[in-house]
Image (cartoon, rainbow, N blue to C red):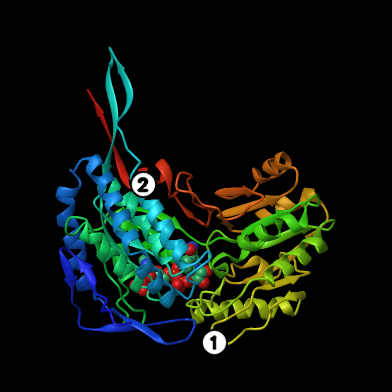
Amino acid sequence: MSKAFSLTIGDAAYAVDSTFDVVNPSTGAVVGQAPDASTEDLDAAVAAANSAFKAWSVTSEKDRQAACIAIADKLEENAEELAQILTREQGKPLGGIGSRWEVEKVVAWARFTSKLSLPVEGIQDNEAGRVELHRKPLGVVGSITPWNFPLLIAMWHVAPAILSGNTVVIKPSPYTPLSTLRMIELMSEVLPAGVVNCVTGSDSSGSNIGGAMSAHEGIRKIVFTGSCGTGEKVMESAASTMKRLTLELGGNDAGIVLGDVDAEAIAPGLFWGIFINNGQTCGSLKRLYVHEDAHDQVVDALVAFAKTIKVGDGLAESSVLGPIQNQMQFDKVSRLVADAKSRGDVKLGGEPGEGLFFPPTIITGLSNDDSLVSEEQFGPAIGVVKYTDQDDIIAMANDSDNGLGGSVWSSDVEKARALAGQLECGTAWVNKHGALQPNAPFGGVKKSGLGVEFGDEGLKAYTDIQVIMS
Ligand code: NDP
C-alpha cells in the first residue's frame, strides 16, 4: 500500500516524527504505517477542535445537516478505497457482511443522521411564564474506537457529535488506524478546518493517547466503544473534569431457543447472529441456550449452515469470513475453546488454523459454569447449553454482569416477545440477533455500558440541557 497516512489536525495533514506498522491479519504482511502521536500532538488536535468549535457551534442546524450529506457523498465517492484499506488492516472480507457492507452502512448512517434535529422544546407557556428546553453542544468530543468495525463505529460517534454542533478528536484502535485516518481526511475535505481531527498512537510507544484523552481538560465528552475494563478506566480518569460519557462496552448476549422452532428456518439467522464479523461484535450472540425438544435439530442445522461458509483471506472475493483480527484476541478464543473442548462435545471446528485463522466452532454440552459461556469470547466460537425447564431459562440468561443484548427464538412470536421483555439487556430481539438500526437507541445495562447511541436519544447525549425561563 503506497499511500502515506497522516494525522488530520486543524486545516492540514500533520506530520509526526515516528510511525508504527499496521499488519494484515490474513497474511501478517505490513500494509501501512500510522503516525505514532505524542500527547503534545493530542494537545494540538484538541486545540484545533476547540478553536473550530467557536464557529461550528453557532452554525445553523440546517448547515450541519447539509454537512452530514456532504460527508456521505464524499465517502460514497471513495467507498472502494476505504473498503480496501479496511480489509487489509482488519481482515474482514471485502464482500458479504464485510468491508464494502461496512462502508455502505457508514454512508447510510451519515445520511440518516442528516435528518435528525434538536428543536427547542416548550415545557410551559402560560400566564405563569414561559419555560423552554434548549440543547447546547458540549465542545470537543473525544471518540475512542475499536478494531472490530473501525469505520462504522467511528461514524456512530462522529455524525451525531458534529450534527449537534460539537467538534471531534478521534483516536482509532492501534490495530486498525489506517481506514479511520483516511476517512477523517476525506471528511475534513468537506468540513471547516478543525471540526474533525484524528490522532493515532501505538501501544508500544507508551503514549497512551486514550488515557490522555479521558483526562484532558480540553475535551468535554468521551464516547468509547471497547472492553468493560477500559470503560471503567475511562470513567475514573474522566471524573475530575466531569466529562459526559457514552460507554458502549462488552456483551455476553444470550440467545434462547424455545422447543417449538423450525430449526432449518432459523439456522441462517442464528449463524449470522453468532458469527457476524467472525463473532468480533459487541452485540453478537455469545451464549446459546436450546430447549431439549429442539436441541439436536438446531445444532445439526446450525452446523450444516456453518459448513457452507468459506473462511479465507479477506482480499479473496470468495471469502465470507476472515481471520481473527489480532493475536491477543486469537489467544483469548483459543483459551476458551480449549477449555470448552475438555468439557463438551465439539460439533464443528475447535482447532486453530494457520496464522490468525480460526474456523467457526460449535461446542455443545456446556453449562453456565464453563468459561466459553460465562466469558465474552469475541470470536468465532459458540458454547451451546441444553435446557429443560422454561421457567429456569430467563434466570440462566440473566446470570451475567453484562446486559447488552439478548434474543428469543420461537414460532410463537408473542410468547417470544414476552420472554424477551424479561431479559436484562438494552436490546432484546425476537427471531434475530444483533440487528442495529439508526433510529433505535442502542446501549447496555449492568456492566455493558452507560448511555445509548443512535436516534434522538443518542443525539441528545452530545448536548447539555439549558432551560430558559421568562
Ligand atoms: P480495549 O477496549 O481495551 O480498548 C483499547 C483502546 O482503549 C485503545 O484505543 C486504548 O488507547 C484505549 N485506552 C486504553 N486505556 C485507556 C484509558 N485509560 N482511557 C481511555 N482509553 C484508553 O480494547 P482491546 O483492543 O484491548 O480489546 C480488549 C477486549 O475488548 C476484547 O477482547 C474484546 O472482548 C473487547 N472489545 C470490545 C469491543 C466492542 O465493540 N465493545 C470492540 C473491541 C474489543 P491507547 O492505545 O492510547 O492506550
The picture places residue 277, in percent across and down from the top left corner, at 54, 67
Looking at the image, residue 323 sits to the left or right of residue 204; the answer is right
Residue highlighted by disc 1: 355
Looking at this view, is 132 or 363 the one in front? 363
Whether residue 106 is visible to the viewer of this picture, yes or no, is yes
How many angstroms separate mark 2 from mark 1 (CA)?
39 Å
Residue highlighted by disc 2: 113
Furthest-top residue in this view: 127
Residue type at tag 2: Thr
The picture places residue 21, in percent across and down from the top left corner, at 34, 84
Quarter of the render that holds ligand 1? bottom left
The picture places residue 286, in percent across and down from the top left corner, at 63, 63
The vertical placement of 127 against 242, above or below, is: above
Which part of the image, by quadrant, shows the C terminus?
Answer: top left
Which of the two discs, 2 and 1, labels the residue nearer the N terminus?
2
Label 1 environment density (alpha carbons within 10 Å; few <14, some 14–19, many ≥20): some
Label 2 environment density (alpha carbons within 10 Å; few <14, some 14–19, many ≥20): many
Q: Name the residue located 31 percent from the left edge and 44 percent from the top edge.
A: 463
Instruction: Provide the secondary structure element on which disc 1 rests.
Output: loop
Looking at the image, residue 317 sits to the left or right of residue 53; the answer is right
Q: Name the residue located 67 percent from the left edge and 56 percent from the top edge.
A: 255
